[in-house]
Amino acid sequence: MTTANTAAAGAPRITVIDPRAPERAKLRVAAYARVSSDSDDQINSYIAQVDFYSKYIASKEDWEMVDIYADEGITGLEARRRDDFNRMMEDCRAGKIDRVLVKSISRFARNTKEYIQFVRELLRLGISIYFEKENIDTGKMTSEQVAQIYGAFAQMESTNHSGNMRTSVRMRMEKGLFVPPTAPYGYRLAGRDLEIIPEEAEVVRMIYSAYLRGQGKEDIARELNRLGTERGRGRQKWHPSTVHYILTNISYTGDMIWQKSYATDTIPFRQVRNHGEKPQYFAENCHPAIVSREEFQRVQELMASRREQFTAGAKPRESVYSGHIFCGECGSMCRQKISSGKRYWVCHRHDKSKADCPIPQIPETEIEQAVLRLCRKLKQGSGRILRPVLGQLRELRERELRSNRRISDIDKEISHLTEQNLVLVRLKSKGYVDSALYLSQTDEIGRKLRDLRKLRRRILDSTGEDRQIQATEQMLVYLEEIPERMDQVDAGAFEELIQRIIIVSAEQVRFQLHNGLELTEKVERAVR
């Protein structure tokens, strides 16, 4: 800095300030780490990733660490289940991050659709992503096709992993070592074994005895509801379909049939009924019986006899509509009926007595045409119908998250624990903390983080918006895959799109979709 001398008395004194280069803003860098299971090896991998990225970012003078986001012990197939990934995306949208480091594409996303969606969003926000394993920097990519190719590789890796899991399950079935993920009503899992719940077993025996005495499934369900019998797992009401499930479940004889359903080979994975596409395994005497094999067999024979009598000698084919059509007047489930070679769907009460319910039977062909029109309209108008609904649901969820004090407190605690973890990493790297203390402290912090994330997920799962968002996203994926004009209704329409069909009248049906949306369609009478 210099001072200029002036000859004139009283002239202002001028001080020249030397120019200085402004401080260069540091690049705000975050890292995302994810492991796929809760095993010890994977947890060590998680600690190693956090340690590596903490040191790596600290070694760059022009980088500033924002945070290390890490999900552990949960599936990576769907981003909605990764709490820290979603927290990172929220921070990106809030302008807190300039660059994201990820070990590999498969750690960032496990299907092409999500991969492209999030890469595009971060690029629009001006945020680059560096994938270490593939040596890809999205900030330097000239074509999105490159990203799509690598995204496809990530999906292939996920599909291969799922295939390995299915092979492992199949081998356990072949060796008789398979443990079902859930226990049927009347049993509970005790380690690797099924054990009887005495009070529920009595209900099962009562259902079998009542049916063999001549009571129908509707009457049995009505009686159980009148007695206030609990269904277990917090469910109260009994339905004829629940009674039917118990009467046809061979598990109550002490035997089991494994792989009655299976997961599809492509993303999004869906559980579908096994109609012979995959082998099934009959496990004999694998747990205590509640009813005898003879009693179970008598029930199956009686059920077949009643079914034969109902259809007047014509055996109904397996229908995709079974369990999905209900009466709009009395709420009863509709059943399939064959008359003069034609298939109809009719309300139980109307079929017994027209005075009990006025809703008439409707030909299956007319219902099928209504479903096909609905699918066509939803596919053509998804941008006007489902996508705005998805946007509104996401906005509602964001409001819920912002206003939910418990979520806010959990996020603060997660952030606080993550900061503690980073401090420990820095102290360890400088030799201030020995390895034993470091591992014990990071293990404790990791345990607390896992508990907090599980609690956060339970709170999110309890909100209706989260379930509706997932259902709407799955519906959009299904609609993208089906042709413009479907020739017939397949099981996928009910697995992904339609929850139930309600017959309002002979001229109108109402569709309840999986995301809670309800739409009506006219029934166009066929020319007779």
Image (cartoon, rainbow, N blue to C red):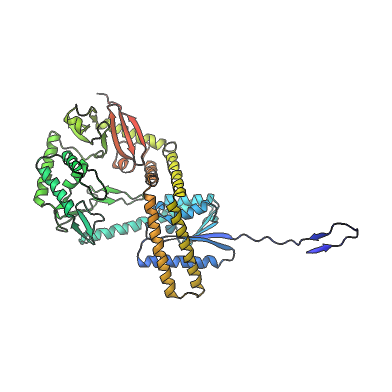
Query: Residue 107, located in which quarter of the rendered image?
Result: bottom left
Q: Quadrant of the C terminus?
A: top left
Left or right: residue 463 compared with residue 246: right
From the viewer's perspective, is residue 328 above or below residue 234?
above
Left or right: residue 331 compared with residue 408: left
| 491, 425: nearer the viewer | 425
| 284, 67: nearer the viewer | 67
Give the percent coordinates (x, y) of residue 338: 18, 32
From the viewer's perspective, is residue 138 above or below residue 421?
above
Give the percent coordinates (x, y) of residue 285: 14, 58
Give the percent coordinates (x, y) of residue 171: 24, 60
At x 8% / y 50%, what residue is drawn? 294
At x 18% / y 47%, what residue is drawn? 246
Q: Is residue 413 visible?
A: yes
Q: Is residue 341 visible?
A: no
At x 44% / y 44%, what residue is drawn? 396
From the viewer's perspective, is residue 210 above or below residue 160?
above
Give the percent coordinates (x, y) of residue 405: 44, 51
From the viewer's perspective, is residue 518 above or below residue 11?
above
Q: Quadrant of the N terminus?
A: bottom right
